[in-house]
Amino acid sequence: MKNLIIFIPSIENAGVEKNLFILSNYFAKHINNTYLVTANNNYKKKFNKKIKIVCPKSRFFNNQSRTIKSICCFFLILNLFKRKKFVLFSFQQNLFALIISKIFSVDLIIRLNTSPNKYISNYFQKIIFQTIYKLANEIIVNSKDFKKNLKKKLNVKSSYIYNPIITNEKFKKKRKKINKHLKILNIGRLTHQKDQMTLLRSLKLLKENNIRFKASIIGGGYNYDNLKEYIKTHQLQKEIKLLGYKKNAHKFMNKANLFVLSSKYEGLPNVLIEAQASGTPIISSNCPSGPKEILMNGKLGELFKVGDYESLCKKIFEYSKNKKILKKKSILAKKYLYRYNYKSNLEKYLKILKNNID
Protein backbone atom coordinates (compact mmCIF):
# COMPACT_ATOMS: atom_id res chain seq x y z
CA MET A 1 0.00 0.00 0.00
CA LYS A 2 1.19 3.51 -0.86
CA ASN A 3 1.52 6.31 1.67
CA LEU A 4 -0.50 9.54 1.59
CA ILE A 5 0.95 13.05 1.51
CA ILE A 6 -1.45 15.93 2.14
CA PHE A 7 0.11 19.01 0.56
CA ILE A 8 -0.98 22.47 1.75
CA PRO A 9 1.79 25.11 1.74
CA SER A 10 -0.19 27.77 3.63
CA ILE A 11 -2.53 27.27 6.59
CA GLU A 12 -4.69 30.16 7.79
CA ASN A 13 -7.70 30.60 10.07
CA ALA A 14 -10.45 30.16 7.49
CA GLY A 15 -13.07 27.79 6.09
CA VAL A 16 -10.57 25.93 3.93
CA GLU A 17 -8.55 25.08 7.02
CA LYS A 18 -11.64 23.77 8.84
CA ASN A 19 -12.05 21.29 6.00
CA LEU A 20 -8.33 20.49 6.10
CA PHE A 21 -8.44 19.55 9.80
CA ILE A 22 -11.58 17.43 9.37
CA LEU A 23 -10.37 15.58 6.26
CA SER A 24 -6.78 15.05 7.44
CA ASN A 25 -7.82 13.66 10.81
CA TYR A 26 -10.34 11.34 9.13
CA PHE A 27 -7.79 10.07 6.60
CA ALA A 28 -5.30 9.34 9.39
CA LYS A 29 -7.80 6.97 11.01
CA HIS A 30 -8.14 4.92 7.83
CA ILE A 31 -4.76 5.23 6.09
CA ASN A 32 -1.78 3.96 8.07
CA ASN A 33 0.92 6.30 6.82
CA THR A 34 -0.45 9.81 6.43
CA TYR A 35 1.91 12.78 6.12
CA LEU A 36 1.02 16.46 6.04
CA VAL A 37 3.49 18.84 4.40
CA THR A 38 3.13 22.54 5.11
CA ALA A 39 5.30 25.62 5.63
CA ASN A 40 3.30 26.60 8.73
CA ASN A 41 4.42 25.06 12.01
CA ASN A 42 1.86 26.65 14.36
CA TYR A 43 -1.18 24.38 13.89
CA LYS A 44 0.18 20.99 15.00
CA LYS A 45 -2.21 20.63 17.93
CA LYS A 46 -5.23 20.56 15.62
CA PHE A 47 -4.10 17.39 13.85
CA ASN A 48 -4.49 13.74 14.81
CA LYS A 49 -1.30 12.40 16.46
CA LYS A 50 -1.15 9.66 13.81
CA ILE A 51 -0.41 12.29 11.15
CA LYS A 52 3.29 12.78 10.55
CA ILE A 53 3.63 16.55 10.11
CA VAL A 54 6.53 17.66 7.95
CA CYS A 55 7.26 21.38 8.29
CA PRO A 56 10.19 23.75 8.88
CA LYS A 57 11.42 24.00 12.46
CA SER A 58 11.72 27.76 12.11
CA ARG A 59 8.67 30.05 12.22
CA PHE A 60 10.25 32.17 9.51
CA PHE A 61 7.93 30.76 6.83
CA ASN A 62 4.68 31.37 8.75
CA ASN A 63 4.34 34.92 7.44
CA GLN A 64 5.86 34.45 3.99
CA SER A 65 3.97 34.55 0.68
CA ARG A 66 2.24 31.43 -0.62
CA THR A 67 4.86 31.11 -3.38
CA ILE A 68 7.74 31.06 -0.87
CA LYS A 69 5.83 28.53 1.23
CA SER A 70 5.26 26.34 -1.84
CA ILE A 71 8.99 26.33 -2.65
CA CYS A 72 9.74 25.36 0.95
CA CYS A 73 7.24 22.47 0.77
CA PHE A 74 8.66 21.39 -2.58
CA PHE A 75 12.02 20.61 -0.96
CA LEU A 76 10.40 19.00 2.08
CA ILE A 77 8.50 16.60 -0.18
CA LEU A 78 11.57 15.84 -2.30
CA ASN A 79 13.22 14.49 0.81
CA LEU A 80 10.21 12.29 1.62
CA PHE A 81 9.96 10.84 -1.87
CA LYS A 82 13.52 9.55 -1.70
CA ARG A 83 12.39 7.03 0.89
CA LYS A 84 8.77 6.05 0.23
CA LYS A 85 6.02 5.68 -2.40
CA PHE A 86 3.16 8.14 -2.09
CA VAL A 87 -0.11 9.43 -3.42
CA LEU A 88 -0.08 13.23 -3.37
CA PHE A 89 -3.27 14.96 -2.17
CA SER A 90 -2.95 18.69 -2.89
CA PHE A 91 -5.34 20.79 -0.84
CA GLN A 92 -4.91 23.78 -3.14
CA GLN A 93 -4.21 24.18 -6.86
CA ASN A 94 -0.42 24.24 -7.00
CA LEU A 95 2.12 24.04 -9.82
CA PHE A 96 4.73 22.57 -7.46
CA ALA A 97 2.43 19.65 -6.63
CA LEU A 98 2.15 18.84 -10.34
CA ILE A 99 5.93 19.07 -10.86
CA ILE A 100 6.55 16.71 -7.94
CA SER A 101 3.95 14.21 -9.18
CA LYS A 102 5.59 14.11 -12.63
CA ILE A 103 9.18 13.91 -11.35
CA PHE A 104 8.36 10.87 -9.20
CA SER A 105 5.53 9.42 -11.35
CA VAL A 106 3.01 9.42 -8.51
CA ASP A 107 -0.75 9.90 -8.54
CA LEU A 108 -1.93 13.46 -7.91
CA ILE A 109 -5.35 14.31 -6.46
CA ILE A 110 -6.22 18.01 -6.29
CA ARG A 111 -8.98 19.38 -4.07
CA LEU A 112 -10.10 22.81 -5.24
CA ASN A 113 -11.58 25.23 -2.73
CA THR A 114 -12.35 28.38 -4.72
CA SER A 115 -14.10 29.13 -8.00
CA PRO A 116 -11.74 29.45 -11.03
CA ASN A 117 -12.90 33.08 -11.36
CA LYS A 118 -10.20 33.85 -8.80
CA TYR A 119 -7.19 32.79 -10.83
CA ILE A 120 -7.94 32.87 -14.58
CA SER A 121 -7.98 36.60 -15.17
CA ASN A 122 -5.91 36.25 -18.36
CA TYR A 123 -5.18 33.72 -21.11
CA PHE A 124 -1.75 32.80 -19.70
CA GLN A 125 -3.21 31.87 -16.30
CA LYS A 126 -5.98 29.91 -17.99
CA ILE A 127 -3.45 27.74 -19.90
CA ILE A 128 -1.34 27.11 -16.76
CA PHE A 129 -4.22 25.95 -14.60
CA GLN A 130 -5.88 24.03 -17.41
CA THR A 131 -2.61 22.10 -17.82
CA ILE A 132 -2.28 21.41 -14.09
CA TYR A 133 -5.82 20.09 -13.80
CA LYS A 134 -5.74 17.92 -16.90
CA LEU A 135 -2.50 16.25 -15.81
CA ALA A 136 -3.87 15.38 -12.35
CA ASN A 137 -5.38 11.94 -11.73
CA GLU A 138 -8.39 13.33 -9.91
CA ILE A 139 -9.93 16.76 -9.41
CA ILE A 140 -12.37 17.19 -6.51
CA VAL A 141 -14.50 20.33 -6.10
CA ASN A 142 -17.00 21.17 -3.38
CA SER A 143 -20.21 22.08 -5.23
CA LYS A 144 -22.22 21.31 -8.37
CA ASP A 145 -21.90 24.92 -9.55
CA PHE A 146 -18.13 24.71 -9.11
CA LYS A 147 -18.03 21.55 -11.24
CA LYS A 148 -20.07 23.20 -14.01
CA ASN A 149 -17.94 26.36 -13.82
CA LEU A 150 -14.70 24.39 -14.13
CA LYS A 151 -16.00 22.51 -17.15
CA LYS A 152 -17.27 25.69 -18.81
CA LYS A 153 -14.20 27.88 -18.22
CA LEU A 154 -11.36 25.32 -18.46
CA ASN A 155 -12.96 22.25 -20.05
CA VAL A 156 -11.83 20.17 -17.07
CA LYS A 157 -13.77 17.23 -15.66
CA SER A 158 -14.12 16.88 -11.89
CA SER A 159 -16.01 15.13 -9.10
CA TYR A 160 -17.94 17.15 -6.55
CA ILE A 161 -18.19 16.33 -2.87
CA TYR A 162 -19.82 18.77 -0.48
CA ASN A 163 -17.75 19.97 2.48
CA PRO A 164 -18.24 17.69 5.51
CA ILE A 165 -19.66 20.20 7.97
CA ILE A 166 -20.10 19.52 11.68
CA THR A 167 -23.54 21.00 12.39
CA ASN A 168 -23.60 20.03 16.07
CA GLU A 169 -25.21 21.42 19.21
CA LYS A 170 -23.09 24.59 19.30
CA PHE A 171 -25.16 25.96 16.39
CA LYS A 172 -28.52 25.12 17.96
CA LYS A 173 -30.21 27.60 20.24
CA LYS A 174 -33.42 29.31 21.24
CA ARG A 175 -33.51 32.77 19.71
CA LYS A 176 -34.43 35.80 21.77
CA LYS A 177 -36.67 38.42 20.23
CA ILE A 178 -34.74 41.57 19.39
CA ASN A 179 -37.09 44.52 18.94
CA LYS A 180 -34.76 47.52 19.16
CA HIS A 181 -32.46 46.83 16.24
CA LEU A 182 -31.08 44.26 13.85
CA LYS A 183 -28.04 42.23 14.83
CA ILE A 184 -26.18 41.69 11.57
CA LEU A 185 -23.19 39.35 11.32
CA ASN A 186 -20.48 38.79 8.73
CA ILE A 187 -17.68 36.23 9.19
CA GLY A 188 -14.70 35.98 6.84
CA ARG A 189 -11.17 37.10 6.13
CA LEU A 190 -10.93 40.85 5.50
CA THR A 191 -9.85 40.54 1.87
CA HIS A 192 -10.80 41.59 -1.64
CA GLN A 193 -12.53 38.22 -2.11
CA LYS A 194 -14.86 38.60 0.89
CA ASP A 195 -15.72 42.19 -0.14
CA GLN A 196 -16.89 43.52 3.24
CA MET A 197 -16.74 47.01 1.69
CA THR A 198 -19.99 46.25 -0.16
CA LEU A 199 -21.57 45.39 3.20
CA LEU A 200 -20.30 48.63 4.77
CA ARG A 201 -21.69 50.72 1.92
CA SER A 202 -25.08 49.05 2.28
CA LEU A 203 -25.07 49.67 6.04
CA LYS A 204 -24.24 53.33 5.48
CA LEU A 205 -27.39 53.61 3.32
CA LEU A 206 -29.35 51.70 5.94
CA LYS A 207 -28.40 54.23 8.61
CA GLU A 208 -29.35 57.08 6.29
CA ASN A 209 -32.80 55.46 6.07
CA ASN A 210 -33.08 55.58 9.87
CA ILE A 211 -32.94 51.82 10.40
CA ARG A 212 -31.43 50.88 13.76
CA PHE A 213 -28.90 48.06 13.64
CA LYS A 214 -25.71 46.65 15.11
CA ALA A 215 -23.26 44.87 12.82
CA SER A 216 -20.33 42.66 13.80
CA ILE A 217 -17.62 41.67 11.32
CA ILE A 218 -15.44 38.76 12.47
CA GLY A 219 -12.12 38.01 10.78
CA GLY A 220 -8.65 39.39 10.17
CA GLY A 221 -6.84 40.36 6.99
CA TYR A 222 -5.02 42.97 4.96
CA ASN A 223 -8.18 45.03 4.33
CA TYR A 224 -8.70 45.84 8.02
CA ASP A 225 -7.34 49.41 7.86
CA ASN A 226 -9.44 50.31 4.79
CA LEU A 227 -12.61 49.06 6.43
CA LYS A 228 -11.80 50.80 9.71
CA GLU A 229 -11.16 54.09 7.87
CA TYR A 230 -14.49 53.82 6.01
CA ILE A 231 -16.35 53.23 9.28
CA LYS A 232 -14.66 56.25 10.88
CA THR A 233 -15.13 58.54 7.86
CA HIS A 234 -18.86 57.85 7.71
CA GLN A 235 -19.34 57.90 11.49
CA LEU A 236 -20.50 54.30 11.76
CA GLN A 237 -18.45 53.42 14.87
CA LYS A 238 -21.56 52.96 17.06
CA GLU A 239 -23.22 50.65 14.55
CA ILE A 240 -20.35 48.55 13.14
CA LYS A 241 -17.62 46.68 15.01
CA LEU A 242 -14.56 44.98 13.49
CA LEU A 243 -13.91 42.21 16.01
CA GLY A 244 -10.91 40.47 14.45
CA TYR A 245 -10.46 36.70 14.45
CA LYS A 246 -12.54 34.80 17.04
CA LYS A 247 -12.19 31.14 17.96
CA ASN A 248 -15.78 31.05 19.21
CA ALA A 249 -17.44 32.62 16.15
CA HIS A 250 -20.45 30.29 16.57
CA LYS A 251 -21.44 32.20 19.71
CA PHE A 252 -21.86 35.34 17.63
CA MET A 253 -23.84 33.36 15.06
CA ASN A 254 -26.23 32.28 17.78
CA LYS A 255 -26.84 35.91 18.81
CA ALA A 256 -27.32 37.34 15.31
CA ASN A 257 -30.71 37.67 13.65
CA LEU A 258 -29.29 38.18 10.15
CA PHE A 259 -26.18 36.80 8.46
CA VAL A 260 -24.75 38.57 5.39
CA LEU A 261 -22.17 37.13 2.98
CA SER A 262 -20.78 39.71 0.54
CA SER A 263 -18.11 37.69 -1.31
CA LYS A 264 -17.00 38.21 -4.92
CA TYR A 265 -16.28 34.48 -5.34
CA GLU A 266 -16.32 31.32 -3.22
CA GLY A 267 -16.18 27.54 -3.49
CA LEU A 268 -18.73 26.32 -0.98
CA PRO A 269 -18.74 28.77 1.95
CA ASN A 270 -18.90 26.80 5.22
CA VAL A 271 -20.15 29.86 7.03
CA LEU A 272 -23.46 29.86 5.11
CA ILE A 273 -24.08 26.24 6.07
CA GLU A 274 -23.24 27.06 9.70
CA ALA A 275 -25.70 29.97 9.56
CA GLN A 276 -28.36 27.56 8.27
CA ALA A 277 -27.56 25.11 11.09
CA SER A 278 -28.03 27.89 13.66
CA GLY A 279 -31.33 28.97 12.06
CA THR A 280 -30.00 32.43 11.20
CA PRO A 281 -31.71 34.13 8.22
CA ILE A 282 -29.29 34.72 5.32
CA ILE A 283 -28.71 37.36 2.66
CA SER A 284 -25.83 36.48 0.35
CA SER A 285 -24.15 37.68 -2.82
CA ASN A 286 -24.92 35.45 -5.80
CA CYS A 287 -21.22 34.87 -6.42
CA PRO A 288 -19.57 31.93 -8.18
CA SER A 289 -19.82 29.43 -6.70
CA GLY A 290 -21.75 28.04 -3.74
CA PRO A 291 -24.29 30.55 -2.33
CA LYS A 292 -26.90 30.01 -5.05
CA GLU A 293 -26.61 26.24 -4.55
CA ILE A 294 -26.66 26.38 -0.75
CA LEU A 295 -29.66 28.73 -0.76
CA MET A 296 -31.36 26.75 -3.55
CA ASN A 297 -31.67 29.78 -5.84
CA GLY A 298 -33.34 31.90 -3.16
CA LYS A 299 -35.60 29.24 -1.67
CA LEU A 300 -33.59 29.13 1.59
CA GLY A 301 -32.38 32.74 1.75
CA GLU A 302 -32.01 35.96 -0.24
CA LEU A 303 -29.47 36.59 -3.03
CA PHE A 304 -28.14 39.88 -4.42
CA LYS A 305 -25.82 40.73 -7.32
CA VAL A 306 -22.10 40.78 -6.44
CA GLY A 307 -21.00 44.29 -5.41
CA ASP A 308 -24.53 45.76 -5.58
CA TYR A 309 -24.67 47.47 -2.18
CA GLU A 310 -27.94 49.25 -3.01
CA SER A 311 -29.67 45.92 -3.65
CA LEU A 312 -28.19 44.52 -0.44
CA CYS A 313 -29.39 47.56 1.51
CA LYS A 314 -32.88 47.13 0.05
CA LYS A 315 -33.02 43.47 1.09
CA ILE A 316 -31.84 44.25 4.64
CA PHE A 317 -34.37 47.11 4.79
CA GLU A 318 -37.19 44.80 3.67
CA TYR A 319 -36.15 42.22 6.25
CA SER A 320 -36.18 44.86 9.01
CA LYS A 321 -39.79 45.71 8.12
CA ASN A 322 -41.03 42.15 7.62
CA LYS A 323 -38.95 39.36 9.14
CA LYS A 324 -41.46 36.55 8.58
CA ILE A 325 -40.54 35.63 4.97
CA LEU A 326 -36.80 35.27 5.56
CA LYS A 327 -37.34 33.52 8.90
CA LYS A 328 -39.52 30.92 7.16
CA LYS A 329 -36.71 30.32 4.68
CA SER A 330 -34.19 29.85 7.50
CA ILE A 331 -36.47 27.28 9.16
CA LEU A 332 -36.86 25.44 5.85
CA ALA A 333 -33.07 25.49 5.33
CA LYS A 334 -32.52 23.13 8.27
CA LYS A 335 -34.36 20.40 6.37
CA TYR A 336 -31.67 20.44 3.67
CA LEU A 337 -28.62 20.18 5.93
CA TYR A 338 -28.43 16.46 5.11
CA ARG A 339 -26.58 17.46 1.91
CA TYR A 340 -23.50 18.21 4.02
CA ASN A 341 -23.67 14.99 6.02
CA TYR A 342 -20.38 14.65 7.83
CA LYS A 343 -19.96 10.88 7.57
CA SER A 344 -21.17 10.24 4.01
CA ASN A 345 -19.08 13.05 2.48
CA LEU A 346 -15.94 11.89 4.30
CA GLU A 347 -16.54 8.36 3.00
CA LYS A 348 -16.72 9.69 -0.57
CA TYR A 349 -13.27 11.26 -0.15
CA LEU A 350 -11.85 8.09 1.33
CA LYS A 351 -13.18 5.99 -1.54
CA ILE A 352 -11.35 8.16 -4.10
CA LEU A 353 -8.13 8.05 -2.07
CA LYS A 354 -8.20 4.29 -1.59
CA ASN A 355 -8.77 3.75 -5.31
CA ASN A 356 -5.41 5.45 -5.87
CA ILE A 357 -3.55 4.13 -2.83
CA ASP A 358 -4.38 0.39 -2.89
Image: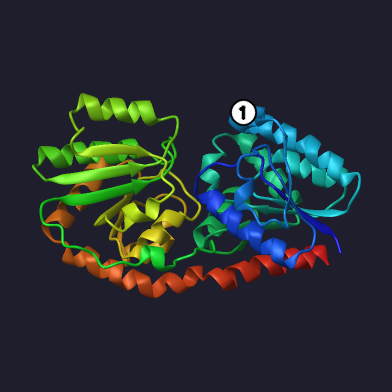
Task: Decide which of 296, 347 is in the foreground and name it.
Answer: 347
Residue type pointed to by label 1: Gln
Query: Does residue 151 appear in the picture of this structure?
Result: no
Residue 216 at x, y percent in the picture? 29, 44
For label 1, the SS is loop
Q: Residue at the location (11% across, 57% down)? A: 179
Task: Decide which of 20, 263 is in the foreground and name it.
Answer: 20
Image quadrant assignment for residue 343: bottom right
Q: Residues within 10 Å of mark 1 (few under 14, many from 20)?
A: few
Q: Residue at the location (24% across, 38% down)? A: 240
Residue 66 versus residue 343 in the image, above or below: above
What color scheme is it?
A: rainbow
Residue 3 versus residue 194 in the image, above or below: below
Q: Residue at the location (91% across, 47% down)? A: 83
Quick check: 307 left or right of 49? left
Quick check: 352 left or right of 288? right
Q: For the N terminus, which image quadrant?
A: bottom right
Q: For the C terminus, which image quadrant?
A: bottom right
Which residue has dot 1 on it?
64
Q: As drawn, which residue projects farthest toward the left?
A: 210
Residue 209 at x, y percent in the picture? 10, 41
Q: Residue at the location (62% across, 59% down)? A: 23
Quick check: 86 left or right of 44? right
Q: How many marks?
A: 1
Image quadrant assignment for residue 171: bottom left
Q: As drawn, which residue projects farthest toward the right?
A: 83
Residue 233 at x, y percent in the picture? 22, 24
Image quadrant assignment for residue 77: top right
Query: Does residue 70 appear in the picture of this structure?
Result: yes
Residue 339 versus residue 234 in the image, above or below: below
Residue 38 at x, y percent in the picture? 69, 41
Residue 65 versus residue 127 in the image, above or below: above
